Amino acid sequence: MYKRIMVAVDQSFMTSQVMQAAIALARLSDARLAICHAVDETLLAQREVAMMLPNSVGKAEARMRLGAQGFLAGLQEEARAAGIDAEIRLVESEEKHVSDMLIEASSEWQADLLVVGTHGRRGIERFFVGSVAERLVRKGQTSLLLVRGEDPVA
């Protein structure tokens, strides 16, 4: 079965479902678990934003990083409470798409399964928001488990 499971989380309504699936699989497989969160800094890296808010971009990045680290620490504790010793990984980039960061992180960690949530967006919303899960299906080399969910406010 799987020996190295990476779960990618994004601070959405799907986090709990995705974590439950990854923890259950790790327990069943006696696998190592890595909890990964990608911080997308591409908006902050745009020249127009940097020019409008020259002193704020660095502070915003630091706040995003600190918030993400706290988020990951809470999920690590959740895994430990379920009997799974998990490590955490925070990946960030000003240039790469979230899917590319996750593909790279799962490859570097040598994951044999990547667990991610899919929000179930359709139509025009999906066109504008994009789909990390869809890009992972198309571009990734690691086995992928999509945990499906529907936005409760949609």
Image (spheres, rainbow, N blue to C red):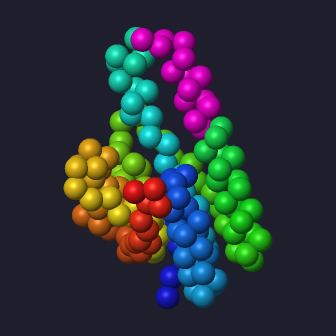
Residue 44: horizontal and vertical position, in percent?
Answer: 43, 27
28 vs 153, left or right, is right
Residue 149: horizontal and vertical position, in percent?
Answer: 43, 68
The quadrant the C terminus occupies is: bottom left
Does the stretch in magenta take in 63? Answer: yes
Count of all numbered marks drawn on residues in the image? 0
| Nearer to us in this view, 18 or 6 | 18
47 vs 38, left or right, is left
Residue at left 62%, top 31%? 63
Q: Residue furthest front?
A: 153
Quadrant position of residue 145 = bottom left
Residue 127: horizontal and vertical position, in percent?
Answer: 23, 49
Vertical position of residue 131 compared to residue 3: above or below: above
Residue 147: horizontal and vertical position, in percent?
Answer: 44, 72
134 vs 26, left or right, is left
Residue at left 40%, top 11%? 51
Does the stretch in magenta take in 2? Answer: no
Q: Residue furthest right?
A: 81
Q: Secondary structure of the magenta portion, mostly?
A: helix
First to last magenta residue range:
52-65
Residue at left 22%, top 50%? 124
Residue 59 in view here: yes
Residue 109 in view here: no
